[in-house]
Amino acid sequence: MFQFFWYDYLIFIIVLSASALIGVYYGFFGSKQKTVNEYLLGGKKMSVFPVAVSQAVSHFSAITIMIVPVEIYKFGGFYLYVLFAVDLMSLITIYIFLPVFFNLQITSVYEYLEKRFDSRTRLLISLFFVISEILTLSICLYIPALAISVVSGFHVHLITVTISAICIFYTTIGGLKTVVWTDFLQVGIILLSLIIVLILGFISSGNVWNKALETGRLDIFDFSLDPTKRDTFWTFVVGYTIHWTNYVSLTQSGVQKYLTLPTLKDCNNAVKIFALVMNVVVILCILLGFLIYAHYSNCDPLLSGKIKKHEQLVPYYIMEIAGNLPGVFSLTLVAFFCASLSTISSSLNAISGVIYKDFVTKFVKSEITEKTAGYILRIIVVIAGILFVLIVFVIEHLGDIFPLVMSMTAFVDGPSVALFTSGVLIPKMNAKGAFIGAIVAFIIQGVIFIISKIYLYNKAIVAIPKPKMGVLIRQFCQTFF
């Protein structure tokens, strides 16, 4: 267990205080976020680079930093194909969806569905978005809490409440401008910590690539169309292109930041910068996964009882290679915090906008003043924040997090992707067909999700990791550690 010193606490206090102070500045000084447009869209006067960086850091989150290396460690380098998916998603965003949303000048991206189909379709997909975001936020909050608890001794629930309280505070008072500029601050900390860890990892590890080759972790040229295979070229390129297109191009949390920019050209440039930053982060996380495998190829810390879940592998590895260097390990823990804070703050702001524009204004017939709207938006942020904190207490009992993230969001994201895509590309698609199709897709996805969980629970479906260096070594770990 890592022992915290005064300088470790100081690093935490400085970073978290800086995030909070940005919220205080935009909440009580500056433009003070007096209108709905300022609170949700930054007055449509934001700059390209900070928006693009904010978009990236809010979408890779602690899930990417902590789970992608574990994915590489257990199943090999197939995640490399996500780089193609990110680039394909960027092209789809620039040439298909973004021009439509920008030209409509909408606040909620789901306004498009009402204009294209009808109000009930808009309300349905808005509800799907809120459900998906709250589930995802719960996981984003749980992951860094799990990381910090395993090395600090603090209880997961205490860490969860602390992170969420800070994030809810500055998001509530500062609006989107706070979200963008705190993200811009936090991405520097995240990239710095990843680079430091990679340098230390290459120094401490042996021949990383030989160990990866010996156990097939670089055998990624599988182009099979077999749908029962967990990892192939197609599952990653096709699956993640659809996933990222929905997440970045067809949700409020993805599109909202682009709509803060004054011109469509600015939006397109922001997408390109976003893709570049995402690719850099994904490559760094993949390299970290190979380094961790090289370090533990002779003895899995889960088998030796050093950790309880593979999701704790990244912080445990960093503690081992950097725990004796003053401030380095605490900086990486702060990076986990930052990755979660950025995702949570962006999503909370987006959720407040969707609930206000798509539900509150629909059902409240009287005119809502700008001042009252500001109060409503802030109350929604607080309620949504409390809700996803409560869901964390359930998620911690549901097993491996990476497949859980994909499964839990798929059965609400699938219908959303289909509706937006058919709305833009199929002119003859009508409102009745769109609504019924979304309901049927939701039911089918839900049934698949439930059945898959039953099969996993009964061990009828088993994800087989890549082999370690040998069976005897594994037995040695189990016997003596």
Image (tube, rainbow, N blue to C red):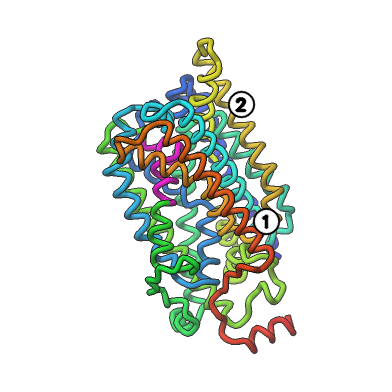
Q: Give the magenta part as a residue range.
A: 243-258
Is residue 251 in the magenta section? yes
Q: Residue at x 41, y 31 (%)?
A: 431
**Distance from label 2 to label 1 (Cα)?**
30 Å
Q: Residue 271 at x, y = what percent?
A: 33, 45
Give the residue at x 57% y 21%.
375
Question: Which residue position is annotated with label 2?
Answer: 379
Q: Quadrant of the C terminus?
A: bottom right
Q: Are marks 2 and 1 in contact (CB under 8 Å)?
A: no
Kind of residue sitting beneath label 2:
Ile
What residue sits 31% from the left and 39% below the top? 426
> Percent position (x, y) of residue 42?
41, 29
- Badge 1 density bin: few <14, some 14–19, many ≥20, Cα 10 Å: few
The kind of residue tagged 1 is Leu
Task: Report if residue 404 lies within the magenta region.
Answer: no
Element class at badge 2: helix
Q: Disc 2 vs disc 1: which is toward the camera? A: 1
Dot 1 lies on which element? loop
Residue depicted at x 56% and y 28%: 173
